[in-house]
Image: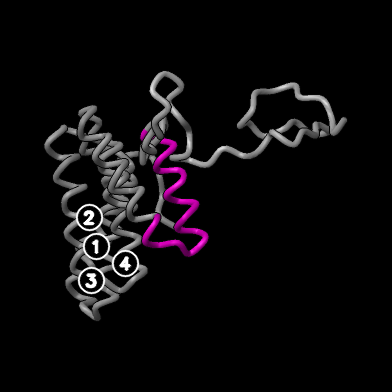
């Protein structure tokens, strides 16, 4: 006898379990028991927007920039559906950071500006996301070689951070 099955077929065995019918379940391979049809994978699963952003940051740290950008897009769509201005701004800032790493300065700038507009429209002028967005705009201008144009954003970011109780290092 190969072992004892303590879980359901299609689930991963627990440590120490062995059974020939136990195999990993792959996303999109589950079957609807009532109809016998394959259940299509949900691109977000049952993840909340924070988990999506967390996974996007992990993908970015691993160098999977396309996957990170896709997850940030999904997060901002979720946040906009929930009328979560801060979450939407965080997702736009994260997606802008991914584009910035790829050298897409204009696209990153537009996402940073969208994040700031989202915060302004929601009346969240004193949120940490605001000074992050301003600092990111400073970095974009500086990276383009527009140092003089970048300085007002740096000063505004420093002022916003002070008002919020944070400090730029």
84 over 110 or under it: above or below: above
Q: Are marks 1 and 2 in contact (CB under 8 Å)?
A: yes
How far apart are labels 1 and 3 at the CA level?
A: 11 Å
Q: Nearer the viewer, residue 99 or 19?
A: 19
N-terminal label among 1 and 3 = 1
Q: CA–CA distance between discs 2 and 4?
A: 10 Å
Looking at the image, is mark 2 or mark 3 earlier in the sequence?
2
User: Which image quadrant for residue 125?
Assistant: top left
The residue identified by callout 4 is: 100
Of the numbered discs 2 and 4, the one sitting upstream in the chain is 4
Residue annotated with mark 1? 108
Write the start and end of the magenta stretch as one range. Answer: 49-67
Q: Residue at x 40, y 40 (%)?
A: 52
What colour scheme does the image use? one colour
Q: Which of the two discs, 2 and 3, sits closer to the camera?
A: 2
- Badges 4 and 1: C-beta atoms under 8 Å apart? yes
Please name whichever residue, 156 or 132, is drawn nearer the observer in this view of the structure. 132
Check disc 2 and report the residue beneath it: 112
Badge 3 marks a residue whose secondary structure is helix
Disc marking residue 69 = none
Which is the main secondary structure of the residues drawn in magenta? helix
């Amino acid at each position: 006898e190969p072992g004892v099955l303590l879980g359901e077929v299609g689930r991963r065995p627990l440590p120490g379990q062995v059974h020939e019918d136990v195999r990993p379940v792959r996303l999109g391979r589950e079957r609807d028991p009532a109809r016998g049809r394959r259940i299509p994978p949900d691109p977000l699963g049952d993840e909340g927007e924070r988990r999506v952003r967390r996974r996007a940051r992990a993908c970015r740290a691993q160098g999977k920039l396309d996957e990170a950008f896709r997850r940030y897009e999904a997060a901002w769509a979720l946040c906009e559906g929930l009328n979560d201005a801060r979450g939407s701004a965080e997702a736009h800032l994260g997606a802008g950071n991914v584009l910035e790493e790829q050298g897409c300065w204009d696209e990153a700038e537009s996402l940073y500006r969208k994040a700031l507009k989202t915060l302004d429209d929601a009346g969240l002028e004193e949120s940490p996301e605001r000074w992050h967005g301003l600092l990111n705009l400073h970095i974009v201008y500086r990276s383009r070689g527009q140092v003089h144009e970048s300085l007002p954003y740096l000063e505004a970011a420093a002022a916003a951070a002070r008002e919020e109780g944070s400090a730029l290092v």
